[in-house]
Image (cartoon, rainbow, N blue to C red):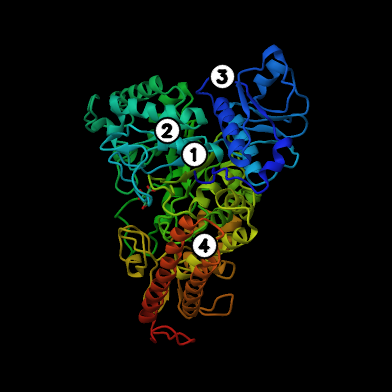
């Protein structure tokens, strides 16, 4: 149920008189999101208040509304057709809605069907939080693309998923029972996600077999009543792979006519089954995978292979910017830098992508690290649609075994002003399409939910999925407000619980950064395989191009133009100058941009090495306080969830000390510089 528990609120019975007794849902087709909204309203009001409403599907007879108090829920158009125009509704854009609780009838009117359902969830969210005040307002989305990505494999495993098996796939096909998928669709609709890419970016071509496309259509069928569209990830060399029921070609060259018609057929076959199919997500020429570069074609030519056949159907290509030369980077080359790859590849192609292509850019230039600057690519391709790729799953950030509320990190990236053409250029306004006047753009969140009851693997990690949807709709919302709405909906209206979970969550990212890798050095986790737990030695000498260049005296990646990899120069001038100069680079990104001695003194007045020691101790100390904080909630929330989460917090408290000691000892040994406080190496 996640945050859609609709738990009874204190004093529920007192509200009965002021609550509607009827729901009029202006569509009687059971696959319509408006119908779903009617069901959801009935269910929610019954569950929260113990009050049963009669639900009427379709227009109320005789073209006028019932004489008793009701919720009228439908598209604005259906409402006007049946009951005449409303004058007080502001302009709604795709997916927007009007919610008014004033007067005899609650009005929930969407610009389209999915927007109507969003409005119903908004109203229920108010009620579930005990808010019965009168409101009347319109809400519109900031960006049209609000998708999750699921890295589910056809065998039912999930890459970087920490909550059990796939809700979509098993044994090479689509599961028979899609109940969980429908429940997931309900959660997503409630946070206004409008599409899901159901399979791993490291895609398996066999998903394209006619039989598996039939299964995909079943997934689309359970998502449709919630207004959530389905998309898939593609493997670029699929035409030359063995896909049951399809021709196998000897080439996958994007300019080859047989390849083009191969993809044309796939696209046609999909739309025959799924007329509202969302589109494709493409990972090409990344981490050793095939792509257009395999044939010396450009990435734009590769994207066109998919955008062209999708165009007549209105489908979208999300083309990932996560393109880099795997295992060819050599650390002995001082100017080699994987962080440069995305801009190097994509900037020259700006303007060459079709209108239905969106470049999907990870928030930072490397890979979902605990601290990265915003990717410069957002500012560098003004003639292309862009979307930001965030992780909801905590791949490098504790894999749901550590508490980590992502929203403050996302917010910091979204609020970064990249100063394109010396003008305000916030990342959020670039991906929404506003800054460069683009029709498409938005958000992709790598969610990776599984069969585990908690969806993501731990109860508190669900605040991340919730916050993703909320920020994708409106990135200017406050991350504490979002968290507190989630907490009330998920746990209780008890303010002491809300305060405690707020404090823990808001301290969680800084704490994790402090005991994993501070000063912009990245996460210092095992880079070779697990991406879990401390392994600072893996951060150099690896062929992934993720380096710290740590030696006995100094540390950090010199990414300046004057003496380093030149990465800083990929930003627009004002930002480039800030990062070029050590004096204006913020301490928390110092080692991202500069290579310095361990004795280098920070703006705070402390040396780099001493700050390493201090922050690792401070971070681990904070993690200890989470146990105490969580303990204080005993009896205030249900025992089952309390006990589950306590286990996580105790584990994190211990593991944070493992982190602290591993990192501080590593750099103590490497540098030979003692800890002024005498902690490191003295046991
Ligand atoms: C990370 C992650 C991989 C994933 C890749 C991607 O490197 O560890 O599992 O495939 O990102 O985003 O493509």
Mark sitting earlier along the chain (1/4): 1
Residue 4 visible in image: yes
Q: Secondary structure at mark 3?
A: loop
Work out how far the residue at label 2 is from the one at label 1, CA to CA, in angstroms.
Answer: 9 Å
Label 1, label 4: how far apart the Cα atoms are: 24 Å
Instruction: Say few, some or many: other residues with alpha carbon within 10 Å of mark 3 (under 14 / 14 to 19 / 20 or more).
Output: some
Residue tagged 1 = 147
Q: Residues within 10 Å of mark 4 (few under 14, many from 20)?
A: many
Q: Nearer the viewer, residue 114 or 24?
A: 24
In the image, is 599 to the left or to the right of 250? Answer: right
Which residue is labeled 4 in the image?
509
- The relative height of residue 63 versus residue 669 in the rendered view (above or below) is above
Badge 1 density bin: few <14, some 14–19, many ≥20, Cα 10 Å: many
Residue 608 image point, x, y percent: 49, 77
Residue count near mark 2 (Cα–Cα under 10 Å), binned few <14, some 14–19, many ≥20: many
652 relative to 8, above or below: below
Closer to the eye: label 3 or 1: 3
Separation of disc 3 and disc 4 at Cα?
Answer: 46 Å
Q: What mark, if any, has residue 366 been given in the picture?
A: none
Q: Earlier in the sequence, mark 2 or mark 3?
A: 3
Identify the disc placed on residue 231.
Answer: 2
Locate residue 355, reporting x and y percent. Answer: 51, 30
CB of mark 2 near ligand 1 (< 8 Å): no
* Residue drawn at the location 48% of the way across and 31% of the way down: 354
Residue for point 49% across, 72% down: 624
Cβ–Cβ under 8 Å for marks 2 and 1: yes
Q: Residue at x 65, y 19 (%)?
A: 78
Residue 493 in the image, given as x and y percentages of width and height: 63, 53
Looking at mark 4, is its residue's CB closer than 8 Å to ligand 1? no
Q: Is residue 533 above or below residue 604?
A: above
Q: How many marks?
A: 4
């Amino acid at each position: 149920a996640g945050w859609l528990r609709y738990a009874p609120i204190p004093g529920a019975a007192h509200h009965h008189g002021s609550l509607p007794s009827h729901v009029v849902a202006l569509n009687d087709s059971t696959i319509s999101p408006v119908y779903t909204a009617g069901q959801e309203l009935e269910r929610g009001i019954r569950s929260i208040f113990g009050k049963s409403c009669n639900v009427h599907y379709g227009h109320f007879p005789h073209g006028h509304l019932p004489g008793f108090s009701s919720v009228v829920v439908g598209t604005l158009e259906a409402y006007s057709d049946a009951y005449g125009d409303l004058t007080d509704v502001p302009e709604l854009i795709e997916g927007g809605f009007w919610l008014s609780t004033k007067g005899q009838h609650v009005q929930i009117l969407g610009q389209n069907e999915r927007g109507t359902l969003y409005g119903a969830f908004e109203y229920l969210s108010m009620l579930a939080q005990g808010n019965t005040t009168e409101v009347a307002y319109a809400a519109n989305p900031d960006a049209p693309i609000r998708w999750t990505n699921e890295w589910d494999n056809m065998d039912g495993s999930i890459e970087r998923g920490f909550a059990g098996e796939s809700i979509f796939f098993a044994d090479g096909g689509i599961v028979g029972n899609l109940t969980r998928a429908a429940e997931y669709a309900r959660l997503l609709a409630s946070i206004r996600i409008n599409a899901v890419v159901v399979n791993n970016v490291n895609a398996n071509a066999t998903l394209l077999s006619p039989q598996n496309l039939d299964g995909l259509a079943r997934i689309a069928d359970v998502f449709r009543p919630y207004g959530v569209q389905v998309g898939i990830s593609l493997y670029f060399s699929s035409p030359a792979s063995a896909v049951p029921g399809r021709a196998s070609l000897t080439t996958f060259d994007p300019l080859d006519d047989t390849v083009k018609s191969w993809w044309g057929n796939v696209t046609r076959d999909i739309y025959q089954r799924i007329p509202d199919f969302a589109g494709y997500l493409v990972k090409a020429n990344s981490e050793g995978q095939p792509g257009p570069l395999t044939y010396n074609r450009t990435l734009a030519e590769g994207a066109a292979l998919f955008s062209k056949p999708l165009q007549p159907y209105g489908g979208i290509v999300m083309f990932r910017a996560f393109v880099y030369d795997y295992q060819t980077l050599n650390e002995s080359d001082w100017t080699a830098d994987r962080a440069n790859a995305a801009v190097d590849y994509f900037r020259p192609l700006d303007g060459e992508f079709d209108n239905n292509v969106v470049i999907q850019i990870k928030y930072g230039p490397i890979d979902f690290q605990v601290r990265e600057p915003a990717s410069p690519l957002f500012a560098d391709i003004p003639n292309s649609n862009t979307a930001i790729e965030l992780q909801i799953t905590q791949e490098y950030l504790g894999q749901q075994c550590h508490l980590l509320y992502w929203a403050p990190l996302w917010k910091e990236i979204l609020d970064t002003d990249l100063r394109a053409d010396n003008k305000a250029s916030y990342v959020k306004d670039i991906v929404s399409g506003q800054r460069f006047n683009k029709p498409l753009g938005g958000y992709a969140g790598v969610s990776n939910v599984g069969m585990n009851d908690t969806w993501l693997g731990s109860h508190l990690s669900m605040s991340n999925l919730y916050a993703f949807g909320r920020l994708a709709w409106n990135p200017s919302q406050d991350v504490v407000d979002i968290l507190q709405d989630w907490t009330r909906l998920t746990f209780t209206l008890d303010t002491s619980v809300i305060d405690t979970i707020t404090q823990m969550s808001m301290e969680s990212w800084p704490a994790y950064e402090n005991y994993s890798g501070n000063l912009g050095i990245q996460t210092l986790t095992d880079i070779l395989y697990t991406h879990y737990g401390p392994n600072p030695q893996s951060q150099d000498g690896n062929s992934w191009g993720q380096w710290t260049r740590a030696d006995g005296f100094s540390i950090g990646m010199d990414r300046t133009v004057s003496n380093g990899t030149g990465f800083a120069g990929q930003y627009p001038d004002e930002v480039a100058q800030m990062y070029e100069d050590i004096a204006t680079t913020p301490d928390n990104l110092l080692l991202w941009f500069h290579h310095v001695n361990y004795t280098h003194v920070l703006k705070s007045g402390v040396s780099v090495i001493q700050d390493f020691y201090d922050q690792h101790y401070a971070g681990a100390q904070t993690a200890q306080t989470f146990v105490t904080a969580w303990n204080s909630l005993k009896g205030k929330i249900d025992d089952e969830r309390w006990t589950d989460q306590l286990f996580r917090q105790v584990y994190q408290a211990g593991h944070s000390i493992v982190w602290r000691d591993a990192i501080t000892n590593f750099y103590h040994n490497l540098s030979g510089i003692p800890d002024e406080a005498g902690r490191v190496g003295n046991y």
